[in-house]
Image (cartoon, grey):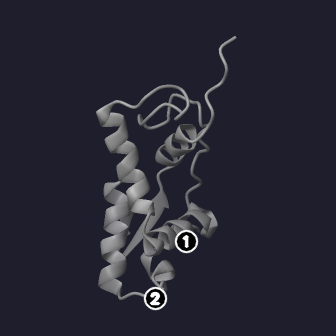
Amino acid sequence: MSNTKVLPLVEPHSDAVAPCCPPLTERRFTADEAETAARMFKALGDPVRLRLFSAVASHEGGEACVCDISDVGVSQPTVSHHLKKLKEAGLLTSERRGTWVYYRVEPSALAAMGTLLTIAPAEA
């Protein structure tokens, strides 16, 4: 029996997208929108965090045990620090199972970042 859960697909323009920001080309950001977007991109601006995020996102089943992704060239406490920063930015979620923690990419945050970087559709 497998503990693997299938994560639902979130379309970039669905109502399930985490509130963040409109496409950059649509209008100027409010201060709150800029703060939210900056927090997400700042979290991914560190090479170790980007590697960890990529390891979780590309892991089979859509989730990864910290024991499977901690080989990024830094100590375990540093890995934990970076995973915490990714969680605080809303990019990852986690679940403790026994002594291990399993991480998943937050699909709504990923969709929100994708929406932010798309070109706004032209008015009809």
Camera-nearest residue between 52 and 32: 32
Q: Amino acid at mark 1?
A: Ala
Q: Residue furthest right?
A: 124
Q: Position of residue 68 (x, y in %)?
A: 51, 81
Quarter of the picture holding the N terminus: bottom right
Q: Residue at x 55, y 67 (%)?
A: 54
Q: Position of residue 10 (x, y in %)?
A: 58, 40
Using a 10 Å C-alpha cutoff, classify the residue at mark 2 as few (fewer than 14 neighbours), some (14 to 19) or many (20 or more).
Answer: few
Q: Position of residue 95 (x, y in %)?
A: 38, 63
Q: Is residue 124 above or below residue 15?
A: above
**CA–CA distance in space, label 1 to label 2:** 13 Å
What is the secondary structure assignment of the residue under circle 2? loop
Q: Is residue 91 visible?
A: no
Q: Amino acid at mark 2?
A: Gly
Q: Is residue 2 visible?
A: yes
Using a 10 Å C-alpha cutoff, classify the residue at mark 1 as few (fewer than 14 neighbours), some (14 to 19) or many (20 or more).
Answer: many
Residue 5 found in image quarter: bottom right
Q: Is residue 26 above or below residue 57?
A: above
Quarter of the picture holding the C terminus: top right
Q: Which residue is mark 2?
A: 73
| Mark number displayed over residue 55 | 1
Q: Residue at x 49, y 86 (%)?
A: 71
Q: Position of residue 13 (x, y in %)?
A: 59, 31
Total count of labels: 2
Q: In the drawing, does residue 19 fall left or right of residue 55?
A: left
Discs 1, 2 touching: Cβ within 8 Å = no
For marks 1 and 2, give the one nearer the viewer.
Answer: 2
| Mark number displayed over residue 36 | none
Q: Is residue 41 above or below residue 103?
A: above
What is the secondary structure assignment of the residue under circle 1? helix
Residue 61 found in image quarter: bottom right
Q: Residue furthest top?
A: 124
